Image (spheres, rainbow, N blue to C red):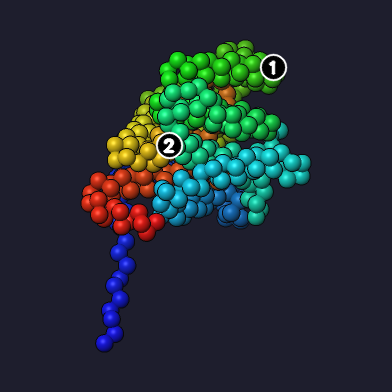
Amino acid sequence: MNKKTKAPVYDPFHFDPILLMASLGILLVGYVMVASSSLHWQVVDNNLLDPLMLNPLKHNMVKQLIFISVGLLFGRWIATIPMRSWEKLGPWLFILGLLLLIIVLIPGLGHNVNGSTRWLMLGGQQIQVSELVKFFAVIYLAGYVTRHQQSIQQSAFGLIKPLLLFSVASVLLLMEPDFGSSVVILIIAMGIMFLAGARLSQFIMLLSLVAVLATLLVYFEPYRMKRVTSFMDPWADPLDTGFQLVQALISFGRGGVSGVGLGSGIQKLFYLPEAHTDFLFSVIAEELGLLGVFAVIGLFSVLVWRAFAIAQAAEQAGEGFSAYIAYGIGIWFGFQAFVNMGVNMGILPTKGITLPLMSYGGSSMVTMCCAIAILFRVHSETTEINVSTPKQRSKRWASV
């Protein structure tokens, strides 16, 4: 008799329903607003031509849908990779990120847009290297603090050592130049190490040093200094240095409580620069009003809350690496969303940082979807640990 072969047993994937709804909500609102902020591009030559019909692949609305679809496909794959595999890959991924930052600075290889060389051309598509570096940085640092947590808690060298590598990445980013991404990466690193138990006194000294260096970088770079001075009084030069912020503030003023209506905003009609990317939040404020602004802030608050809740659950289950990855993603999304919203509302100087999962752009969208997928993986593995017996856990890890 032929022996019957047993069907393979797969561990169930445990979704976090609240994180899923928040993520899908941000994606949906973002896509609708990118479409709204790009509608006027369809009107050419007195409504006689419609680029969406002539060449749909060139329209932002279609391209953003493709970016989201690719991001979800990559996220689906990312979610199947065990966290132990990410822990092993962390150092190599960060080295790859540094190499990409070097390659993008090589003349002829890096693609220049608006005076910044931040992109590599791959298969006809622009890849923004800094987005990948943020992703790799979270994975690498989560592994580092897991392996060296005692050193971070007890000595200043344990705190400084990883920051030396991150400083190299920051210098390379500043050479593009990309001041915003370098700040985001340093904030992620410092946030993770603080949560890993770094001494408060050492952390405050380090934070002060970073603040001084950032101030010097602003002071000695004319275009950054111009942004700071225009942020302090944008109405002093509303047609030049203060133009972006003035138009953004007008958007918020026109929106009122309930907005002027979806698609009815006028600031996006060549008044508000980068309305579909860095200043998408201003379009939301104008068309959806204060209610729309509160809704978006609420969605991001839920996302960051779930990231930290997932991290805390992983830490309690003894999964340090998974916990610090979730913490890092929460810090990344929370800080980047805060900066983008702050710039749009005029409480922070103008900086080219996208709104996660909402702003137009392929590199940012795909990377952010992958980061959310890792959050789902952390939640799934933590839930499986909590519901399974020690014997079942040992069998599962033995097969990884």
In which quadrant will I find the C terminus? bottom left
Displayed quadrant of residue 123: bottom right
Q: How many numbered callouts?
A: 2
Dot 2: few (<14), some (14–19), or many (≥20) neighbours within 10 Å?
A: some
Q: Secondary structure at mark 2?
A: helix
How far from the left and from the top, in percent, is residue 18? 30, 41
Q: Which residue is mark 1?
A: 220
Amino acid on which disc 1 is placed: Phe
How far from the left and from the top, in percent, is residue 52? 57, 52
Amino acid on which disc 2 is placed: Thr
Looking at this view, is 157 or 68 the one in front?
Answer: 157
| Marker disc for residue 147 | none
| Residue drawn at 30 percent across, 76 percent down | 5
Pair 2/1: label in front: 2
Q: Secondary structure at mark 1?
A: loop
| Residue drawn at 65 percent across, 43 percent down | 99
- Tell me if 43 is positioned left or right of 150 in this view: right
In which quadrant will I find the N terminus? bottom left
Q: Residue 176: tell me if it is visible.
A: yes
Q: Which residue is mark 2?
A: 146
Displayed quadrant of residue 321: top left
